[in-house]
Structures are given as structure tokens and as C-alpha cells.
Image (tube, rainbow, N blue to C red):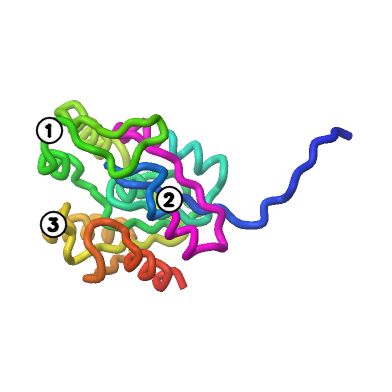
Amino acid sequence: MSDYWYEPRQKPYAMYIHGFASSARSGTRSTLSRTFADYEWLAPEITHNPFESLDILNEWARTFQPELIIGTSMGGMLCLYVDAPQAVKVVVNPSLEMERTLRQRGYGKHPYLQEREDGATEFVIDEPMIHRFIDFRKEHEFVLGSRNIALFSRDDELIGHEGAKRNAALVEKAGFEVNWSDKFGHRCNDNAVKLISRLLS
């Protein structure tokens, strides 16, 4: 018998997927950890390449088998595609039309909201990046979880109300429970996390 000692994990895993200009250091992850303390929270850092990001997320999902996955903005969009049928999926203001959002933000350099794990502080939006998102959407289909919840803001300053309505119609058709709120904007703030807690209770 080996000398290897193993302490069984006491909590199920949950996974948070951050947004486009964010990182694994997002404050939302800390808020989720406090609010949903019964889970051990994972926060993989994704890239601006949706193909590469989905590979990362699927690897984490296979390895850890999270029971809950929450994604916001671009992270919400990717959450829809993660191969985790065992998980409850919650998407907050999923950015399903990334090409619109990126063109609206503008070509060129932009700052990250937090420093990335690799130390990067800014990113560049260009046409090849935009077309990767278009191709990604054409080549992938949503994967439903054990329960599927979508939360949309009526005052989404990034996507806009009409864009949010288009996104809500798409996820509702796919089988998500759609919920609307005027308590927060595009970003998943404390009010949004409180609403998620109510929806999951």
C-alpha cells in the first residue's frame, strides 16, 4: 500500500464562466462563492477564441463534473455549449451576437476589467476575431443541462433591450426558463447573484 494520502472532497463543484473583458479573477466569482458556499467554485480563464475556450471549459467539465455552471455575457454564451448535461446551467445576459457587441465596442485596443492570469492588461478587437464568433455559432449547438435558467436585464447597457429580447427568444426556444429583472444592468452584480439564489432555491 502506498503512502499517498487522500482527503475526500466535502463539497460538490460549481463553475463560473467570466465575460469577454474579464478574467478568472472577476469579483463575481467571489460573490458567488460567498452566496453559494455549499459549492467548491472553479473559475477557468477563457480566451477570446470561442473554439479554444469551449475546449477549455469542456475539459474542466469532464474533469470536475460540476453540478452548477453559471456564465455571464460571453461566458453565458459559452455556458450554453458546454457539454455538461449533469449540471444546472444558469446564463446571465448571454451575449449570443458577439459580432454586434464587438463592432459596437470598436476595433483596436481595449483594457481588461482585471489583470489576466498571463499578466495581460489589454486586448485587440479585429475582424478575424469577429468572424471566429460567427463561425463558432454556425458550427455548434446548445447542450442542455439538468435544469436550464436564463436571467436577462431589462436595462442591459451593452447588448440593449432589443438584443436581449432576441437572445431571450433563442434560449427560451432551446428549453431555458427565461427570467427578466430591472435590478441590474449587463454585468452580474450582487443584485443579480441574489436573484440567481432565489431562482435556484
**Residue 153 in the image, given as x and y percentages of width and height:** 22, 64
From this viewpoint, is residue 142 visible?
A: no
Q: Residues within 10 Å of mark 2 (few under 14, many from 20)?
A: many
Residue carrying label 1: 107
- Callouts 3 and 2 close, C-beta under 8 Å: no
For marks 1 and 2, the one nearer the N-term is 2
Front-most of residues 179 and 155: 155
Q: Residues within 10 Å of mark 1 (few under 14, many from 20)?
A: few
Given the image, on which type of amino acid does mark 2 rest? Tyr
Q: Is residue 31 magenta?
A: yes
The residue that label 2 is drawn on is: 16
**Residue span colored magenta:** 30-54
Cα separation between marks 1 and 2: 28 Å
Residue at x-position 45% and y-position 55%: 30
Residue on which the image places disc 3: 160
Q: Residue at x 17, y 60 (%)?
A: 165
Residue type at the position of mark 3: Gly
Question: Residue 178: x percent and y percent?
Answer: 29, 66
